[in-house]
């Protein structure tokens, strides 16, 4: 029996995402090593505490309450629920949450498993890529506008005119050409 318990404990602590196990009153029954590392909290300040009181009330997050108190009671699982929150001491975190209710013993109230993936860095990269994409689009528009302007000048010249690229291939020619 002890070997099986160690087996599941090791799996629980190997997962990269932070995981909380909550009772029906939102009290933390257990948390994995990743949760403590990501959110810079101690086990002694977490285990047995009400979730919303963790970190001097920092976990009293309105969207987290919506997930646990409104969405999860209507469903057995909720996946990919994204919330953003500014934690004192560690800064803003963007988190992707998965939650599910499970029953351990037949007549016991269900417990809640809450998996928390820190996607802060991913969102920052995505924002940077989106900004770069928009800048490239503006550059492309500017390039197209400049090309159209140059071509209109070429087409207004009365003398035959031809524009060549660096390999001496014809890029454009005036009407009179």
Image (tube, rainbow, N blue to C red):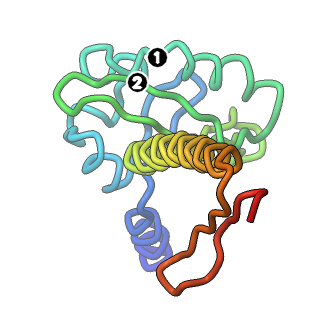
Residue 116 in the image, given as x and y percentages of width and height: 49, 44
Q: Residue at x 31, y 56 (%)?
A: 33
Q: Are marks 1 and 2 in contact (CB under 8 Å)?
A: yes
Q: Quadrant of the C terminus?
A: bottom right
- Per the image, the residue denoted by label 1 is 61
Q: Earlier in the sequence, mark 1 or mark 2?
A: 1
**Does residue 15 appear left or right of residue 45 in this picture?**
right
Point out the residue furthest to the front here.
Answer: 159
- Per the image, the residue denoted by label 2 is 85
Q: Residue at x 53, y 29 (%)?
A: 83
Residue 6 in the image, given as x and y percentages of width and height: 40, 73
Q: Secondary structure at mark 2?
A: strand
The answer, for residue 176, to whether it is visible in the render is yes
Q: Secondary structure at mark 1?
A: loop
Tally of marks:
2
The answer, for residue 133, to whether it is visible in the render is no
Nearest the camera: 115 or 142? 142
Point out the residue furthest to the bottom here.
Answer: 167
Q: How far separated are the C-alphas under marks 1 and 2?
A: 7 Å
Q: Residues within 10 Å of mark 2 (few under 14, many from 20)?
A: some
Residue 42 in the image, given as x and y percentages of width and height: 19, 40
Q: Residue at x 54, y 41 (%)?
A: 142
Q: Is residue 8 above or below residue 52?
A: below
- What is the quadrant of residue 56 in the picture? top left
């Amino acid at each position: 029996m002890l070997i099986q318990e160690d087996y599941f404990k090791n799996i629980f602590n190997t997962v990269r995402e932070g995981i909380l196990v909550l009772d029906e009153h939102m009290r933390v029954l257990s948390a994995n090593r990743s949760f403590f590392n990501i959110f810079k909290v101690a086990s002694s300040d977490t285990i047995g505490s009400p979730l919303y009181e963790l970190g001097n009330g920092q976990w009293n997050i309105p969207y987290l309450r919506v997930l646990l108190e409104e969405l999860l009671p209507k469903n057995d699982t909720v996946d990919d629920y994204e919330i953003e929150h500014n934690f004192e001491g560690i800064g803003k975190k963007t988190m992707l949450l998965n939650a599910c209710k499970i029953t351990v013993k037949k007549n016991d109230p269900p417990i809640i498993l809450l998996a928390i993936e820190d996607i802060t860095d991913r969102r920052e990269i995505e924002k940077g890529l989106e900004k770069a994409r928009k800048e490239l689009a503006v550059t492309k528009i500017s390039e197209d506008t400049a090309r159209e302007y140059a071509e209109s000048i070429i087409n207004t010249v009365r003398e035959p005119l031809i524009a060549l690229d660096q390999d001496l291939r014809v890029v454009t020619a005036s009407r009179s050409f």
